[in-house]
Each structure stands twice: as C-alpha cells, then as structure tokens.
C-alpha cells in the first residue's frame, strides 16, 4: 500500500492454513459510504472519531465482502490496514483496545495498522443543526427492544435517537414521533455493502455512529436497549455462537476505546439488561396502555431471516410458507420475541409438534427447551449455577453480573417460555 491511500485492505485467515488467505479492499468515502439525515450538533467531529467510524464501517463491510468459509474453517485471524487522518492518534492504547474489542465480538484475532490517509476531503454528510440540548444519544433500530426502551425506560428530555436504516427509515421515524421525540438522526449506507451477511461486528458500527452523533452535541452518553437474554449472549447450547452485540463487556470496551482515543468521560448503558423481553413489553404497556403499546410493537421486527423467502433453506412446511418481510418464528430472536408477544403470527408456528420436530425449523426451540427445562428443575441457586452455560459463568467471573440477577433473569425467561409454548 502507498504511504497515502484511501483504500483499506483486510486479509482473513482460516483455521486450516492450507486453504489460503482471503482478501478484500474497501475504498473509504467512496460509493457505499455513510450519509446522515439530521439532526447533528454544531460541533465538528474530531479526526480520531471520524477515523473510528470509518474503521467500524470497514470492519462491517469486510465481514460482508470476504467469501464465506465452511463451518469447520472460519476465519480466526484478520490483518487490517486502515487509512487514517492522523495515524499517530491510534498508537499504543487505542489500537490495543480496538483489537481487544473486535476479538471479543468475533472470537478472532485482529492486527490493525493505521496508515496516512490521502488528501481527499470528507463528504458533506448533510448535517442539520438543531437547537435542542442533547444529553444522551439512544440507538433506535426499529426492533422491539429499542422501541420498549425508548418508549418508557429512557428520560425523554435531552435524548436524541440515532439509527442506521435500510428499509426501516419510516418505521424508525414513526416510532420516534409516537413517543414524542424529535426526528431521529438516521444514518444510511449508500449502495450495497456486500453479498454476505454481517453478524458479529455490526454493533461496533452502531455504537460508533452514536458516538459521532453524541460528540457533535458535546454529549458523552450512549444508550443501547437489548433484553437481558440476548444481551448476555448466553446460548442454549455450547455449539451455538451468539453475537455479543449489547454485551456489558462490549460497552465497557467501547468506553475504554473512546476515552483512550479522544479523552473525556464516556458512559454506555443498557436499561433492559436485567429484563426479559416480556418484561420490557409489559413496561411499555404500563406506560402507554395496551392498545397504544400494541400499535408500536406491531411496527417492529426481530427476525434473523426477515428479508429472505426461506429460513434455514426451508420455504414451505406443513402447509405454511415463508414470505419476504415475514418473521420466521423459529430463529432465536423470533423465539425470544414470541415469549413477549405470544399471540403474534409468524411464518412457522412452534406450537405445532411438526414444526418443533423438524430437524432445521425446530432446532433452536429444542435447544432452548433442554436448557430451560434444566433451569426449571434446578431447586437452588447452586443447582442453577451448575446448569448455566459457560458464557453465564464468564459473566459472573468477569464481574458483569451476579448469580442472583442471572438466576432471576433466566427463571423469568423460563416461565415466559413455558407459558408461551405449552
């Protein structure tokens, strides 16, 4: 790479060396880069924070653009070169924390080198300066948890909503208006980011967008709402890899990254951390009333396979058919969602024994059934600890949660699960 460049390069290395490396190249600031539809604050974005957002987008795009490897040979190491406005700002601690954060999100090693960026100016992101004071920025995805959190668990005064949209632009605006918020700051990725799918690293992009938005207002507080079952990233079986998109350790690492990179005191929180999804919906119902709350929750989606005409390769089964923009009902987010809204309709109904026993459609349901049955049979906290997956023990060992709070959370989810499906 030249000493000055506007192209990032990412190399991916699988577990089995003989299959070789993968490589993808990403032009910074070109086609497919980010734009915003206001409001943003009057303060300029520091170069280091602009670099952070660029890096987050590079990682997001690299995960989508690198060819998919087989399940037995995932990429376990990445080498990434990123053009920077000021490479010296990343020397030492900032790069170390960034690599640790990405390693935690994707369970892979990252080696990142920042080089001098070319002389092209940043594109105008279409900022709109509004006069309201902003104390915090809250992420609004268009999903159920962010709607519940912004609707009843975050102080409305001083809160600006922030989102990345593809097809959820109007849904996000409608949700914000329904709660009486001003227009959200909506970021948009122009063009196609790649043919693949992004799972592990996209939350890094969301948090980086929120940080840039907050900094323009002089705010250093970010809120990300996710129910405790998914935020804890505790899988029903050890073979299943859960994303850590709202994990408390991710939030702590992101705070360390911001403070080492640009200084100041930052705070990232999740007000739904100790709640099940059903408890979050109940909180919204108590705030708005059941009818108005239902009008909001009906706008939201939670499915991994929403835009696909199939789920796990299955298009039709037992008289049902999966349609595009229809929630599948059998992925993990759908299962957790249904425990919050049991009467909602999905493509495939897990109350049917035929669907439950399907080798693909019923897999995650049966995995949860096994874990939650063991939790229901656990008589004491010590029994609960013995059946808790390793990810739960790590939460406690690292100080992110205590046994009492995890037991309350998962016993609550267990009750919701059996109430919904049995």
Image (cartoon, rainbow, N blue to C red):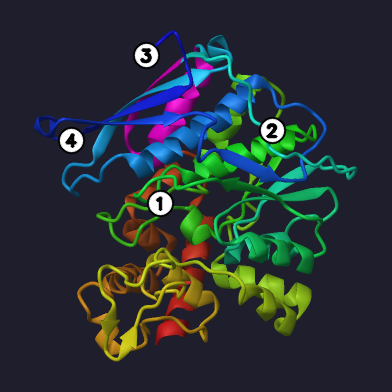
Residue to which mark 2 is pinned: 124
* Residue drawn at the location 70% of the way across and 71% of the way down: 284
- Whether 126 is among the magenta residues is no
Q: Going from the N terminus, do you reach mark 1 or mark 2 first?
A: 2
Q: Residues within 10 Å of mark 1 (few under 14, many from 20)?
A: many
Residue 419 is at least partly visible in this image: yes
Residue found at x 59% / y 67% = 144
Which portion, as a residue range, is magenta?
Answer: 92-114
As helix, strand or loop, the secondary structure at mark 1 comes to helix
Type of secondary structure dominating the magenta stretch: helix
Distance from label 1 to label 3 (Cα)? 43 Å
Residue 1, which numbered label?
3
Q: From the viewer's side, name the closer residue of 193 and 329.
A: 193
Inter-mark Cα distance, 1 to 2: 44 Å
Q: Name the residue beneath numbered marker 1.
A: 392
Q: Earlier in the sequence, mark 4 or mark 3?
A: 3
Q: Is residue 324 above or below residue 206?
A: below
Which residue is identified by label 4?
15
Kind of element beneath mark 3: loop
**Looking at the picture, does residue 266 appear above or below residue 71?**
above
Question: CA–CA distance between discs 2 and 4?
Answer: 41 Å
Q: Position of residue 361 (x, y in %)?
A: 28, 75
The tag earlier along the polypeptide, 2 or 4, is 4
Where residue 281 appears, as percent x and y from the top left, is 63, 72
Which of labels 1 and 3 is toward the front? 3
Residues under labels 1 and 4: Cα distance?
Answer: 26 Å
In the rendered structure, which disc, 1 or 3, sits on the residue that comes first in sequence? 3
Residue 416: image location, x then y, percent? 49, 77
Q: Nearer the viewer, residue 312 or 102?
A: 312
What is the distance, in whole Å, between disc 4 and disc 3 at their CAs?
26 Å
């Amino acid at each position: 790479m030249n000493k000055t460049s506007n192209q990032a390069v990412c190399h991916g290395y699988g577990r089995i060396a003989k299959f070789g490396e993968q490589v993808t190249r990403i032009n910074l600031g070109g086609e497919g880069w980010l734009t915003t539809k206001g409001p943003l604050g009057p303060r300029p974005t520091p170069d280091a924070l602009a670099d952070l957002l660029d890096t987050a987008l590079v990682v997001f795009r690299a995960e989508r653009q690198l060819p998919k490897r087989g399940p037995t040979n995932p990429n376990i190491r990445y080498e990434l070169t990123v053009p920077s406005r000021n490479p010296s700002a990343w020397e030492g601690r900032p790069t170390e924390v960034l690599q640790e954060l990405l390693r935690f999100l994707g369970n892979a090693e990252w080696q990142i080198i920042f080089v001098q960026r070319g002389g092209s100016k940043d594109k105008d992101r279409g900022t709109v300066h509004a006069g309201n004071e902003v104390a915090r920025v809250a992420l609004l995805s268009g999903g159920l948890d962010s709607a519940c959190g912004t609707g009843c668990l975050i102080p409305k005064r001083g809160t600006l909503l922030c989102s990345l949209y593809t097809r959820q632009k109007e849904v996000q605006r409608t949700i914000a208006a329904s709660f009486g918020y001003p227009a959200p700051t909506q970021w948009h990725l122009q063009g196609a980011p790649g043919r693949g799918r992004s799972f592990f690293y996209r939350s890094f992009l969301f948090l980086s967008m929120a940080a840039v938005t907050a900094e323009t207002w002089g705010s250093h507080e970010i809120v990300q709402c996710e129910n405790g079952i998914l935020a804890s990233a505790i899988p029903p079986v050890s073979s299943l890899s859960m994303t850590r998109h709202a994990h408390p350790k991710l939030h702590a690492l992101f705070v360390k990254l911001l403070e080492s990179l640009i200084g100041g005191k930052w705070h990232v929180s999740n007000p739904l951390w100790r709640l099940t999804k059903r408890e979050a919906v109940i909180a919204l119902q108590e705030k708005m009333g059941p009818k108005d709350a239902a009008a909001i929750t009906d706008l939201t989606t939670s499915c991994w396979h929403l835009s696909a005409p199939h789920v796990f390769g299955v298009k039709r089964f037992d008289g049902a058919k999966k349609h595009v923009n229809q929630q599948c009902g059998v992925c993990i987010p759908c299962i957790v969602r249904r425990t919050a809204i049991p009467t909602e309709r999905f493509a495939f109904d897990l109350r049917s024994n035929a669907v439950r026993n399907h080798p693909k459609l019923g897999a995650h349901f049966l995995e949860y059934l096994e874990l939650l049955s063991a939790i229901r049979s656990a008589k004491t906290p010590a029994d609960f600890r013995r059946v808790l997956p390793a990810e739960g023990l790590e939460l406690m060992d690292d100080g992110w949660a205590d046994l009492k709070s995890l037991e309350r959370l998962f016993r609550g989810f267990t009750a919701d699960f059996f109430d919904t499906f049995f």
